[in-house]
Amino acid sequence: MKFGLNFFPSFRPEDSTTADYYAQCLWLAERADQLGYSSIKTVEHSFFDYGGHSPNPCVFLSAIAARTKRIRLITGAVIPAFHHPAHLGGDLAMLDNMSSGRLDAGFGRAFLPKEFEVFGVPMEESRARFEEGIAIIRRLWTEDRVTHKGRFWTIEDVHLMPRVVQKPHPPIWIAAISGEESFTYAARNRFNLMIVPYAGKPGLLQELVGLYRRVCSESGHPPGAEQVQVAQFCYVAEKRDEARAGFERICKRYLQTFADACTAWQGRSSDQYPGYERMVASIIATTPEKIVANGGAFVGTPDEVADQVKACAESFGGSIEPSMQINFGGSSDAEAFRTLELFASRVMPRFRENWRQTSVLAG
């Protein structure tokens, strides 16, 4: 099993400066590369303490690319609706070159009304822009010259520069939470899947991942070729009470920043985001204890966390890659590095050993 880190800034000015948060992430990334973590992911959000310190994942990941050697770099996710596809495709191709072919390109639709308002994009056009933008970017990466006349963008005889390193193109990931259409779209196009358990209704997300795997198979994709990355909070300590208390403090801050960013959803609904007003209300009303109980976080001693990882993998069937938030809500350097080191030394080896044993038996 592979394990990654998910950098999702969610803190107040009294918790940290933006520059200090970036420095913390870079230190963690360098150490994660040495410890054998497989990926680093960061989000695109704007205007709020919830994610707004990361408006451009390509800039952030370029800094990490310069300080690491092998770890994969994932945009988790960039938003096609807010960018011209020729510009975004070029930014991503530049990052693929700067990292010597370590880019995984994750795309999302966005869901915060304020972002759509500021960028002048109607939420009703979200999915159509998302799909058209990805289609253009994939063509720009794989074709020498591209002409496209679509609903939102028109380009004529465009040769994208720079060219991507990976052929035919970097792996593509789709962020999905609760919309069945997102899961089937990813499956039919042979894209990988990024999911967020704590944001979904328990049980429903497992059904949607099952649908994704089934549609992948029905679409003729090789069995087991699909990849599923699971975003999880993670807080590890030697003592259970210390882990629970530390997680509760920083998770409450995360939920506070989330609530601020989602105020526009109150009393609002959208055909493009069915059920999101209820989902957002549910997340705002939740507690750190409920997130752990519902399987949205790995929290506790190394032994407890190993059991939680196993339960998570079993609940989704097939292989998954946990992508873990370990420095959110104003985490201190000591807390974040303790989780990073304990997880690498006391949790990861158990799953690598299980993989080796399974491989020997299968052979």
Image: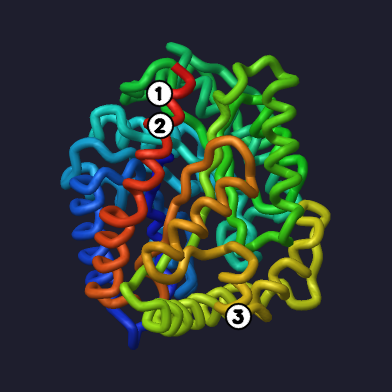
Looking at the picture, which amino acid does disc 2 mark?
Gln
Residue 357 tag number:
2
Quadrant in which the C terminus is drawn: top left
Q: Nearest to the eye among marks 3 and 2: give it.
A: 2
Q: Which of pointers 1 and 3 lies earlier in the amino acid sequence? A: 3
Helix, strand or loop at label 2? It is helix
Residue picked out by circle 1: 360
Residue 53 x/y as whole percent: 38, 66
Dots 2, 1 in contact, CB < 8 A: yes
Mark 1 surroundings within 10 Å by alpha-carbon count, few (fewer than 14), some (14 through 19), many (20 or more): few
Q: Are marks 1 and 3 in contact (CB under 8 Å)?
A: no
Q: Disc 3 marks which amino acid?
A: Thr
Of tags 1 and 3, the one toward the viewer is 1
Give, as a three-letter code, the residue at label 1: Val
Comes first in the chain, label 3 or label 2? 3
Q: Is residue 227 above or below residue 307?
A: above
Q: Label 2, label 1: how many angstroms apart (C-alpha)?
A: 5 Å
Asked if residue 90 can be seen in this view, the reply is no
Q: Secondary structure at mark 1?
A: helix
Residue at which label 3 appears: 287
Count neighbours of disc 2 (C-alpha within 10 A) and say few if under 14, some if 14 to 19, many if 20 or more.
few
Measured in 3D between alpha carbons, the distance from the residue under mark 1 to the one under mark 3, in whole angstroms, is 43 Å
Q: In percent of the image, x 64 and y 59: which residue is there?
A: 111
Quadrant (top left/top right/bottom left/bottom right) for the N terminus: top left
Q: What is the C-alpha distance between the residues marked 3 and 2?
A: 38 Å
| Percent position of residue 355, x then y | 42, 34
Residue 344 in the figure: left or right of residue 211: left
Q: Quadrant of residue 123?
A: bottom right
x 65%, y 78%: residue:
286
Q: Work out whether residue 150 or residue 199 is closer to the camera in this orientation and state it.
A: 199
Residue, far top: 144
Q: Quadrant of residue 129?
A: top right
